[in-house]
Image (tube, helix red, strand yellow):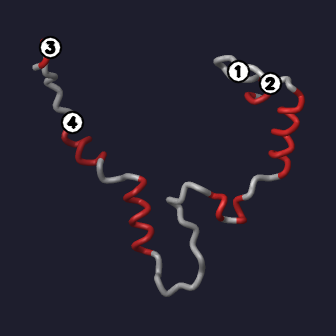
Amino acid sequence: MENGAERWNFLGDGKLKATSGTTTVHGVLLNIRRNVDKDDPRPTVPLGHGDPSLFPCFRTTTIAEDAIVDAVRSAEFNYYSPKPGLFPTRR
């Protein structure tokens, strides 16, 4: 071992190891894709796609946009937030 470091004698639980690798997000997405009928004409939303801006049904509501603009213009939040967060956002 380098620099006198000791080797860990941790082997883990075999049952947990066996089950932990079977369910992943990628695995679920692949399973869904395998079960989609290729001849079905209906469009599907790609669940693994990280950018929703390509789809018009995933637009931000104007209420949220106006809230952000109002917060920026008010200058009430021009500081780092405290550890527990801002009270108005927690309530």
The answer to whether mark 3 and mark 1 are in CB contact below 8 A is: no
Q: Which residue is mark 4?
A: 13
Q: Position of residue 81 (x, y in %)?
A: 70, 21
Q: Nearer the viewer, residue 2 or 47?
A: 2
Judge from the rendering whether residue 63 lies leftward or rightward of residue 13; answer left or right. Answer: right
At label 2, the amino acid type is Phe
Indicate the secondary structure of the residue bearing disc 1: loop
Q: Position of residue 20 (x, y in %)?
A: 30, 45
Q: Which residue is mark 2?
A: 77
Q: Residue drawn at (40%, 57%), measured in percent from left and top?
A: 26
Mark 4 and mark 1: Cα distance apart in space? 41 Å
The answer to whether mark 4 and mark 3 are in CB contact below 8 A is: no
Q: Which residue is mark 3?
A: 3
Instruction: Give the number of the disc on residue 64.
Output: none
4 or 2: tag closer to the N-terminus: 4
4 or 3: tag closer to the N-terminus: 3
Q: Nearer the viewer, residue 68 or 26?
A: 68
The answer to whether mark 1 and mark 2 are in CB contact below 8 A is: yes
Mark 3 and mark 2: Cα distance apart in space? 49 Å
Q: Which residue is mark 1?
A: 81
3 or 2: tag closer to the N-terminus: 3
Mark 3 and mark 1: Cα distance apart in space? 42 Å
